[in-house]
């Protein structure tokens, strides 16, 4: 079977690379099959401990050694139970991959045969037939090898040897007086505390663990591999710069770089296809010189259609295709999909925000971490579920956090199509960066390559230097201690090195390769215009709540200019918990739950309990613990997000931490690893709605603000009604109003005496509503104490099923209603909602289980039902 597959491959390659007298088209043949792996023979200690892995075994490319060993049941799945420790040896071991490439005389008639690795993780040496041809040291780069001189007719061996990153770097790190401050210390003893190797390597930082993810130091060719055949010239890059955009026309410049190995005539033909399918073509004759040739062709688009963020118009997209023609035939092609739009940073008097196509847009959304500990597990379908879930809950921005990896084009294609703005970090997660010029040069190549690849996506509205590097250097205690140890001269050398990297190298990559997109040197940052991470200027990461154990009401204390990180943890659904923990008895301190809780090295469940006991009361069992944690998370983030929106235009963005998970865990995500929405994600649809009412109770009074993201005024009505627990009306206030465009407006401040008519705070509540026409578009419950002090009655919740829909009815006020299906995976169309006395809501439930099984499993939870 293998011989037949190899023969088929050779025939395909022959057809693709056989050369006529004139230059033939460039062709690419995937080399993702036929790989084997083993422990590198030089790693004697690993061979002694794991002898079966010293023999060649099949390996999947793209992929990682860890995935191959999991598939072969040589290591347990680290996502299950407490298995994470058992896989650690894999990332500390040297490995080899090999593949045989059959080459024919016809293949060698091509001028060039290039071996291209789109990603090698990380320290990799490539040999062809025993001759070293590449030493790679950056997982974020593409590596191209001019392989023809090393190939021969017949069988050729490609061998890739990966050196374990910790073993490679640790001698250098340990020899230093003080190593660069990093991110998270290892829980497995492979690195001394405070002596991390991660700052010195261009590898996804989350591999080394984070406070939401495991330590899995992936090894392997993690992106596709291919053989490219070409003759005298090829298109190296294509991008489209937007020189000007108005309602009358757009002036574009299609910029190509042609790599040629000799001088000669050629023609570049560029075709632009509009959203409606109409084409226009421009051509340019050129005389190529040996080496890289920059060729630009102008294109004018009459009456251009703009790409708009979701909620502000359509997402018009154009396609630009370039062809390199030699001797009358196309020898190479490239294409890009683009959108026409303008983006400006709002920077007046310390402000931070986005103006897209001239419209100041309040950014609503979340931070995105990598979709999986193993990137090759991520499919376009799984990404689409998360991107769609963001769009469907009224988000308009996602921040791609800097401790992971640059995502596939498919993600940005989805964001382009759905109108989601993307804040794109460069891949720096929080560690101090090495000050040497060689490191910066490596990063420069990485940055230019990635901006060149992604820069034409209209969804990307910001490139940022990375996550918490600059603010950490200024403010964090371990950085301050490091500065004292190394002294003033070394402190200055490192500080200057970071300034050159983040203010020059990365900024220049964006200015030269995506000139229509702003650059921001880090998050949080003030673009070197004063201190970072303050409420007064730039973007803010606020962690007094949760990490600092402060009350959630601290969210109301200030109006930051742009809140790019804040968060609150919650448990995933019980179905997800049972998936990784099994069916045995569980409590917050169970070893398996602590293993999947990375905050405070596994003790983060105590923080969940602290906030739970402070606001909601003591959980009765593990299912109640899950429920209360999700209620707390949803209400905390809703309080913050609505406050941010009510601070407009002082505040112009609210991105909570975090949208997703990399593994099944207890974390800040609103969608767990299994794709199940926590109550927070349902709440986001309400607090990120285009028009909302904000009701903030503080110091015996309630502030009422109305918010609208619409670009035109809207006639509306607001009202507040107070009730006792029996449903008796106590007071009502409200008014007809007009919501100004793009606004937040304070409309009332009501003291408790007037609103509640002297009723007991524990037995009364108010309902604030915003109505447009006959529809209630936003509603919130006002309490004068934390929920555990409220004497809510049992709401008498009932469920009536009809096929895959269930109608939930409440006899009395039902706060935070949750449809809990236990260990059965199910997705309700709404969840975590409030019901007023006598109200019903009909919910569609999507599940692989039958309606009968769902009905039998359903538990209706509410804050009143617990008592």
Image (cartoon, grey):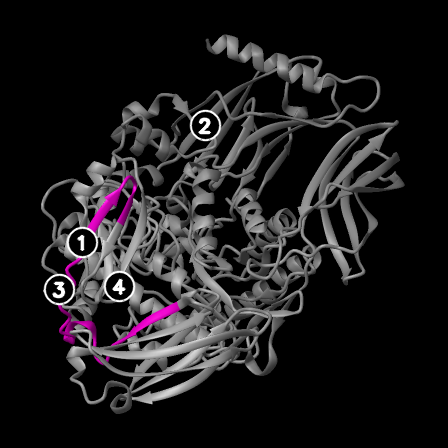
Query: Could you classify mark 4 by the number of other residues whose Cα lies within 10 Å: few (under 14), some (14-19), or many (20 or more)?
Result: many
The boundaries of the magenta stretch are 778-806
450 or 311, which lies in front?
311
Residue under circle 1? 798
Left or right position of 228 against 85: right
Query: Could you classify mark 1 by the number of other residues whose Cα lies within 10 Å: few (under 14), some (14-19), or many (20 or more)?
Result: some
Residue under circle 2? 97
Disc 3 + disc 1, Cβ < 8 Å:
no
Image location (x, y in percent) of residue 97 = 45, 27
Whether residue 469 is situated above or below residue 372 in the rendered picture = below
| Quarter of the picture holding the C terminus | bottom left
Image location (x, y in percent) of residue 134 = 57, 35
Residue under circle 3? 794
Left or right position of 228 against 470: right
Residue appearing at x 56%, y 37% in the figure:
118
Disc 1 + disc 2, Cβ < 8 Å:
no
Whether residue 479 is situated above or below residue 861 in the rendered picture = below
Mark earlier in primary sequence (2, 3):
2
549 or 266, which lies in front?
549
Q: How many marks?
A: 4
The label nearer to you, 2 versus 4, is 4
Residue appearing at x 64%, y 17% in the figure:
13
Residue under circle 4? 835
Q: Secondary structure at mark 1?
A: strand
Q: Which mark is residue 141?
A: none
Whether residue 33 is situated above or below residue 762 in the rendered picture = above
């Amino acid at each position: 079977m293998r011989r037949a597959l190899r023969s088929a491959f050779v025939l395909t390659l022959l057809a693709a690379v056989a050369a006529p007298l004139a230059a033939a088209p460039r062709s690419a043949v995937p080399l993702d099959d036929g790989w084997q792996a083993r422990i590198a023979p030089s790693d004697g200690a690993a061979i002694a401990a794991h002898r079966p892995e010293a023999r060649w075994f099949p390996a999947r490319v793209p992929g990682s050694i860890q995935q191959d060993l999991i598939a072969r049941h040589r290591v347990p799945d680290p996502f299950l139970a407490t298995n994470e420790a058992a896989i650690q040896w894999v990332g500390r071991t040297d490995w080899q991959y090999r593949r045989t490439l059959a080459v024919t005389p016809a293949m060698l008639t091509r001028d060039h045969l290039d071996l291209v690795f789109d990603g090698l993780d990380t320290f990799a040496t490539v040999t062809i037939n025993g001759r070293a041809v590449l030493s790679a040291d950056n997982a974020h780069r593409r590596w191209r090898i001019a392989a023809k001189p090393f190939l021969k007719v017949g069988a050729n061996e490609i061998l890739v040897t990966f050196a374990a990153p910790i073993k490679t770097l640790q001698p250098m790190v340990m020899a230093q007086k003080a190593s660069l401050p990093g991110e998270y210390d290892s829980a497995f003893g492979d690195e001394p505390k405070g002596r991390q190797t991660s700052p010195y390597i261009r590898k996804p930082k989350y591999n080394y663990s984070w406070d939401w993810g495991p330590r899995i130091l992936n090894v392997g060719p993690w992106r596709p591999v291919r053989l490219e055949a070409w003759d005298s010239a090829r298109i190296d890059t294509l991008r489209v710069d937007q020189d000007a955009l108005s309602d009358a026309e757009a002036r574009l410049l299609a910029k190509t770089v042609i790599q040629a190995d000799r001088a000669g005539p050629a023609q570049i033909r560029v075709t632009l296809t509009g959203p409606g399918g109409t084409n226009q073509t421009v051509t340019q004759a050129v005389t190529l010189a040996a080496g890289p040739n920059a060729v630009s062709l102008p294109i004018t688009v009459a009456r251009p259609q703009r790409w708009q963020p979701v909620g502000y118009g359509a997402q018009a997209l154009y396609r630009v295709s370039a062809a390199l023609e030699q001797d009358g035939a196309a020898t190479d092609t490239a294409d890009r999909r683009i959108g026409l739009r303008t983006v400006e940073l709002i920077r007046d008097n310390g402000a931070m925000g986005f103006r897209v196509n001239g419209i100041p847009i309040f950014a609503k959304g979340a931070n995105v971490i990598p979709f999986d500990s193993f990137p090759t597990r991520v499919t376009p379908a799984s990404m689409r579920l998360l991107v769609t879930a963001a769009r469907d809950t009224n988000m308009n921005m996602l921040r791609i956090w800097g401790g992971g990896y640059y995502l596939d084009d498919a993600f940005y294609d989805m964001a382009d199509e759905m109108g989601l703005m993307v804040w794109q970090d460069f891949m720096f997660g929080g560690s101090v960066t090495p000050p040497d010029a060689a490191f910066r040069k490596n990063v420069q190549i990485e940055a230019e390559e990635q901006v060149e690849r992604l820069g034409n996506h209209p969804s990307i509205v910001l490139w940022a230097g990375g996550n918490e590097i600059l603010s950490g250097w200024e403010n964090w205690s371990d950085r301050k201690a490091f500065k004292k140890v190394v002294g003033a001269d070394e402190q200055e050398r490192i500080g200057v090195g970071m300034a050159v990297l983040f203010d020059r190298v990365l900024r220049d990559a964006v200015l030269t390769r995506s000139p229509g997109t702003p650059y921001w040197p880090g998050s949080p940052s003030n673009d070197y215009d004063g201190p970072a991470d303050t409420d007064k200027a730039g973007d803010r990461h606020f962690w007094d709540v949760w990490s600092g154990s402060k009350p959630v009401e601290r969210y109301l204390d200030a109006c930051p200019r742009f809140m790019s990180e804040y968060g609150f943890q919650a448990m995933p659904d019980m179905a997800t918990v049972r998936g990784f923990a099994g069916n045995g008895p569980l409590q917050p301190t169970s070893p398996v739950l602590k293993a999947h809780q990375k905050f405070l090295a596994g003790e983060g469940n105590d923080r969940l309990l602290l906030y739970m006991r402070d606001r909601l009361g003591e959980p009765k069992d593990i299912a109640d613990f899950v429920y209360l944690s999700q209620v707390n998370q949803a209400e905390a983030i809703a309080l913050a997000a609505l406050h941010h929106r009510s601070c407009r235009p002082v505040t112009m963005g609210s991105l909570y931490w975090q949208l997703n998970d990399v593994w099944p865990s207890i974390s800040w995500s609103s969608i767990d690893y299994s794709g199940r929405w926590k109550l927070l994600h349902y709440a986001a649809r309400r607090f990120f709605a285009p028009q909302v009412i904000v009701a903030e109770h503080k110091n015996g009074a309630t502030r009422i603000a109305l918010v609208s993201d619409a670009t035109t005024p809207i006639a509306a009505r607001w009202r507040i009604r107070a009730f006792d627990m029996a449903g008796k009306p106590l007071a009502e206030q409200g008014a007809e109003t007009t919501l100004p465009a793009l606004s937040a407006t304070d409309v009332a401040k009501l003291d408790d005496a007037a609103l509640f008519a002297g009723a007991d705070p524990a037995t009364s509540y108010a309902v604030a509503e915003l109505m447009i026409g006959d529809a209630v578009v936003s509603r919130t419950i006002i309490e004068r104490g934390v929920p555990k002090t409220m004497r809510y009655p049992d709401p008498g919740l009932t469920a009536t099923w009809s096929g895959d829909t269930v109608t939930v009815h409440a006899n009395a006020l039902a706060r935070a209603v949750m449809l809990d299906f236990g260990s059965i995976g199910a997705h309700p169309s709404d969840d975590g909602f409030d019901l007023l006395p006598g109200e019903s809501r009909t919910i569609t439930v999507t599940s692989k289980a039958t309606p009968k099984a769902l009905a039998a499993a359903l538990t209706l939870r509410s804050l009143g039902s617990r008592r």
